[in-house]
Image (cartoon, helix red, strand yellow):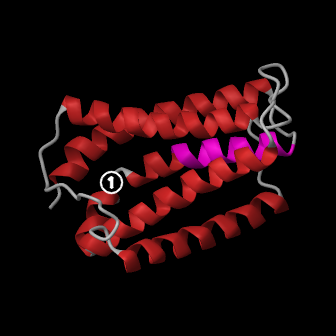
Amino acid sequence: MIASPQPADRRLLAIALGVLALSIALGAAIGASRMGLYVPEASSGSLADAGGIFANNAQLCALLAAAALLQPRGVPGLVPGFLPLWLTDLTVSFVVLLNLIVLGGVIGALGLPALLRIAPHAPLELGAYALVVIAYLRARSGELGRRGALLRFAIAALLLLPGAGVESYISGALG
């Protein structure tokens, strides 16, 4: 069973929402073109697009999951940790911050149409990323066991599957 939110979790959520707002604002101020991002035109989607989206998102979640598993405490009953905490913290922070800045750049380039294109699939993808980041934070503090880790990683993967389909077929068709 996943534990109920603790005061520390609420504090982390507030910090995360602040980082989200600042990162998106920074990305929007920079703009997609200045970051070298290509924002594709609307398309009707395809299985190949959905597969590519899933693969990209799964790679990011796998990197975050690896940080959770390999940070110094590891996950009891699953894997002993061995990477230095500064390295796993830096990795997770960099992945999260960079992706939020890119999101801000896309919103800055497309404005309201970007929000309309992101809205259908964002809850699924952001939910998956949030689960894996929460798993990292719990593992880091020694509060994540084997069952909790596997459950969070599996749910994250299951969220990414329909998220990729929605992004390809629904979000991609919005112009």
Residue at (71, 37) in percent of width and height: 68
Residue 20, compared with residue 93, is above or below; it is below
Q: Position of residue 132 (x, y in %)?
A: 62, 41
Figure quadrant of residue 109: bottom left
Task: Confirm whether residue 43 shows in the render.
Answer: yes
Q: Residue furthest bottom?
A: 29
Question: Quadrant of residue 117 in the image?
Answer: bottom left
Q: Element at badge 1?
A: loop
| Of 161 and 79, the residue lying toward us | 79
Q: In this image, 132 relative to 31: left or right?
A: right
Q: In which quadrant is the N terminus drawn?
A: top right
State the residue in front, 152 or 85: 85
Is residue 135 in the magenta section?
Answer: yes
In front of the other: 34 or 25: 34
Taking the view exactly as shown, the residue that stands out farthest to the top is 77
Going by the numbered disc 1, the residue's amino acid type is Pro
- In the image: residue 31, left or right of residue 159: left
**Residue displayed at 65% across by 29% down:** 151
Q: Is residue 145 above or below residue 89?
A: above
In the rendered image, the vertical position of residue 143 relative to residue 148, given as above or below: below
Q: Is residue 27 left or right of residue 168?
A: right
Q: Mark 1 points at which residue?
A: 120
| Towards the viewer: 19 or 98 | 98
**Residue 87 image point, x, y percent:** 72, 46
| Pointer 1 local density, CA inside 10 Å: few below 14, some 14–19, many at least 20 | some
Residue 159: tell me if it is visible: no
Q: Magenta stretch containing residue 76, yes or no?
A: no
What's the magenta region? 128-141
Dominant SS in magenta: helix
